[in-house]
Amino acid sequence: MSLSHDHDMAVSLTQQDRSRRAFVSTLRSHVLQQMSGDLRQHFEHSVEPEHAKSGAQLETPEAIHEALREEFPFKAYSSVRTAAQEMVFDVVSDAVDRQLEVLNEKATKPATHGTLKLDPLLPLPKNVTGIDVHLSPGGYHTEHAEDDVTAGAVYDNSIDVFAFGQFGKQHNDIGTTLSNYLRLKYPDFSPASILDCGCTIGHNTLPWAETYPTAEVTAIDAAAPVLRYAHARAESMGIAAHFTQMNATAMEFDDAQFDVVFSSMFMHELPLKHIQLYLKEAFRVLKPGGILWQMELPPMNAMPDYENFYMNWDTFYNNEPYYGTFRKQDYKQLLIDAGFRAEDFVEATMPRYTFVGESAFCEAIQDNNTFDTLTGRMDPKGTRWYGFGAWKG
Ligand SMILES: C[S@@+](CC[C@H](N)C(=O)[O-])C[C@H]1O[C@@H](n2cnc3c(N)ncnc32)[C@H](O)[C@@H]1O
C-alpha cells in the first residue's frame, strides 16, 4: 500500500491508523484477487457445467448474475467486498477528522500558482447529492464546516487503501498514462489548453500540466469540498491548475476554448441523459483539431460475458447505479450523437505509464486494442487502462 503523498494536505498517521489502513487494504486486495478467482472457478467448474446439463447456456452477464446470486462463493465475495468498501471510508476518516481544522485552514492559504473559483449558487446534480456514491458517506459534496475539505481529504486518503497502490504513488497514473499516450502517439499535437471534467481532487488533472508544461490546465467538478482540496493539494505541489465549480452538462465556457477535453472515471457516474449532455458540451467547447480523450470502463461489447458480469457488480452492490447502463452503450455512437464524426473516433488500451516506464509503454501502444481480464481492473499483475474519444474534425 502506498502511503506517499508529498504534499501539504497529507494527514499524519498514527501507528493505529497505519495498521487499520493496511488491514483494510489487504482485505480489499484479497477479495479482488483470491476471492474473485475462487468465484470464477466455482462458476466455471460447477455452476456452468450444472446448467449445461439441463441445456441452459449462461450467455449473458444477467444470466450469470442470476445463476450465481444464491451461491455461497458469490454471497461471500459480495459481503466481504461490501464490508471492505465501507471499512475503507471508516479507517481513513479518523485521521481526517482529527486534523480537519488544520486542513481547512491550510486550504484557505492565498494561491501562488493556480486558481479556485467556487459557485455557491450552482444547483448540484442529483447523481452527486442523491446517493452516497460507491458507499462513501456524504459523497463528494457534503460540507461539515465553513471552507470544508473533508470530502476531498477522505477521497485522497481512501485511494491509498482502496487501490492498494495500483493508481501510483501520487494516485496520478491514469492522467499520466492518458496524457503520455497523446504525447507519444501524436507528437505534432501540442495542446495549449486542457480541460479535465469531474476532476474530484485533481490527482489525474495535474499530470497534464507535467506532460504538456506550456498548456493551461483547467479542471471542473460540481462539488466544492473536493475542489478546495484539489486546489490546495496542487498549490502545495507547486503545479498550476485552475479549479472551477461547474456542471459538466452545462458548461460556462465559450465555444471552441480547449484543445483537449479529458475525463477519468467520470461518465460511469452519470445517468445516460447527462452523459449525452456532457458529450455535446465537450464537443462544443473543443477547438476544431482538438480531442476528447477519456479513461473509462471498457464497453460491454468488447469484453467476455463473465467479465461483464464481474465488472457490473458495482451497479447492484456498490451504489454505482449508472455503471451498467453506461457500459451497455456503443461508445462510438454516443460520440457521433454528440457531433463527432465516426472516422475521428479513437480508442486504445494501454499499460500503466508510471509502472512500466516510457520504452515499454511506447512498445505496448503500437498495438492499440487488447481487451483482456486486466483491462480496466486494478490488478498488481498489470492493469491496462481503456481510453476512448474523438478528434473534432
Ligand atoms: C469518480 S469521480 C471522478 C474521479 C476522478 N476524475 C479520477 O480520475 O479519479 C466523479 C466526479 O464527478 C463529479 N461530478 C459528477 N457529476 C458531475 C457533473 N454533472 N458535473 C461536474 N462534476 C460532476 C463528482 O463530484 C466527482 O467528483
Image (tube, grey):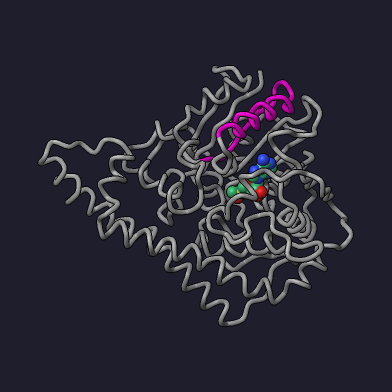
Q: Say which of 390 and 151 sits in front.
A: 151
Q: Residue 381: x, y in percent?
A: 40, 54
Residue 65 left/right relative to 389: left
Instruction: Determine whether 56 is above or below 114 in the image.
Output: above
Residue 33 left/right relative to 270: left
The residue shown at (26%, 35%) is 59
The residue shown at (44%, 68%) is 26
Task: Work out whether residue 150 can be spotted.
Answer: yes
Instruction: Determine whether 114 is above or below 214 in the image.
Output: below
Instruction: Determine whether 62 is above or below 166 in the image.
Output: above
Instruction: Determine whether 7 is above or below 177 in the image.
Output: below
Boundaries of the magenta span: 272-296
Quadrant assignment for the C terminus: top right
Number of numbered callouts drawn: 0
Task: Work out whether residue 197 can be spotted.
Answer: no
Q: Residue 164: x, y in percent?
A: 50, 62
Q: Residue 142: x, y in percent?
A: 69, 58
Q: Is residue 21 magenta?
A: no
The residue shown at (87%, 56%) is 111
Quarter of the figure with residue 388: top right
Q: Residue 211: x, y in percent?
A: 68, 43
Q: Is residue 289 magenta?
A: yes
